[in-house]
Amino acid sequence: MRLHSLVLKDISRRKIKLLVAVLGVAVASAALVAVVTTFSAATDSLYEESNNFGANIIVRPEVKTIPLLAGSTSMGSLLVGENYIEESEIPRIYTIMDSSKLSAVAPRLYGVAELGNASVVIMGVDPEEERKLKSWWKVRGDWISTEGAGQTEVMIGSDVATPMGLTEGSSITLRNGNISMDAQVTGVIESTGGNEDAYVILPLAASQHLLGREGKVSSLEVRALCNTCPVEEISMQIEEKFPGLEARSMSQIVRNELAIVEHIRSSAMAVSIITLLVSTLTVASTMLASVNEKLKEIGIMRAVGASDAQVVSMLLFEGAIIGAVGGIIGFVMGTIASSIAAPLLVQVTPLPMWSILLPVTGVCVLTGMLASILPAKRALGVDPAEVLRSV
Amino acid sequence: MSDGNNMIRIQGAGKRYPMGAGEVEVLRGISLDVKKGEFVSVMGQSGSGKTTLMNLIGMLDSPSEGTILIDGNDITLKPQKELVGLRRRTVGFVFQQFHLIPSLTAYENVALPLVFAGEKDNGAVDIALERVGLSHRKEHKPAELSGGEQQRVAIARAIVMKPKILLADEPTGALDGTTGSMIISLLRSLAGEMTVIMVTHNRELAMLSDRIVNLVDGNIAE
């Protein structure tokens, strides 16, 4: 027989009374697990939904500015570098380390063309990728498709449509020098207040043909989902893979997303910490009551040779057992609670997070041991002579 | 260091406890020598200081004044940590109320001192239980044993470490006369192997010991 078996036998004898302490830990553990599980699922959901926020990385050719000087007099500056990205290079972006985090890579080609007597900005896009980034656009009519039915399809912004009296179904002719292209308006984008209000948007291949830029794109708009690494890290990976291109993370969007996540995380942690503190008090109170009940036994043990260290280690072990059992029960309770509450509160259905079982149980074991310190001090104050005399 | 033939030498030991604003003096500078293997009964009225004397000898309490030598060791000079070890090796306790741990079997209760001393059983528990005639009841818990059997388990627990001193505080106080006599016979048989000090109110049982020490108001009455 060892000290540990003494404690286990004692626990089995008083299991109903110790159930209160176990439940105290279980409630704290359940709260912790429910909060973490729900928060994690909500964060994942937030990142998925944040696709709607648009791109968070813009990739474009790196252009260097060289100042022009004549003696000591500035003559302005010269931009040096390629203005376009080779379209054939784009698939290489999926070879970066965090490529699984890339949810959309939308190439764009910008240029100017004639529409009637006016000049308009045209934007060539990959319709499928673009739609992932601009899901909030309200389009009267239809989105363009990559392969139109014989005729080039375009979408136009409201600032183009209204003055020219164009609407979905209208036919237009775009010109750029000697190149002319007939197209059909499939949809009109309702005003967003953004640049697209003044754009004529057409499939990338058509825009390349119209602008005489076959195989070229002006920029890539990238949406990266990354709740475990900073978007800046993905930008760096892109730059490493594409020397000569610069990838800028749109820090405002990233900051907003992180702020939301951080806010949820802070609130969740505050709740968890308060619950843990309450749990520690519950366990400490139960353990203290338990020690008070066991004063006689502690006195006997000390009389038959138990040292202070042995008495303390027995109580700490008891606290650890209570913590471990409470932690595991709490994990189950918390997982069930989050699966019920999360769909109602944050409209997500979380899966059990087995990865937190061990850490949560560890925290509960520590809580149980921490809660045993005060009772252990009380036990050390037990004078065996006095206890044995009084019983 | 052994002090000649004495297992216990008490010189001018007194014990005072705080009570309210003042103090109550339970033992008043007593002196007492007990030989190795001797069986001594301590008698006296309630409050005469019998249990306090036992606690001092058992190193559960320390005197307010005077010296106590146990097997030649002055326990008044030793730190508490050292006393725990000395107590484990030197003293076995038997109490009036048995003080067994209810969740443990008779065997486990007897094994407790070995567990706390970090020593292996090596058959010591079985030998102790056999000595008190309870080998056949070793798997029973205290609630399943009679009062006399519980006290015999307590005696087995007290002797399992082969102590030099066995302290028995009213060992028959909770038992009927016949059972009490059996317990005293058992203690009597242990004397010689170890020094036995027994507190009792029962003069007839005390007569079975080698010597009777009477305590009156914290003093030893000759």
Image: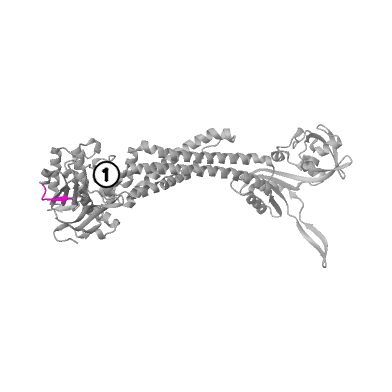
In terms of depth relative to the viewer, which is nearer, A76 or A253?
A253
- Majority secondary structure of magenta residues: strand
Under circle 1, the secondary element is helix
Q: Is residue A108 above or below residue B74?
A: above
For the record, the magenta segment spans: B208-216
Answer left or right for A332 relative to A156.
left
Which amino acid does the dot numbered 1 rest on?
Ser
Q: Residue A121: x, y in percent? A: 82, 44
Answer left or right for A35 relative to A113.
left
Query: Would you identify the image quadrant in which residue B33 lies?
Result: bottom left
Q: Is residue A90 above or below residue A190?
A: below
Residue B160 in view, yes or no: no
Answer left or right for B30 relative to A10.
left
Q: In the rendered image, which quarter contains the N terminus of chain A?
A: top left
Residue marked by disc 1:
A390
Answer left or right for A345 relative to B36.
right
Q: Name the subunit of mark 1.
A: A
Q: Residue B31: x, y in percent? A: 17, 57
In terms of depth relative to the viewer, which is nearer, B217 or A78?
B217
User: Extreme front residue here?
Assistant: B21
User: Extreme right residue here?
Assistant: A117
Q: Find out whether residue B91 is within the magenta segment.
A: no
Residue B102 in view, yes or no: yes
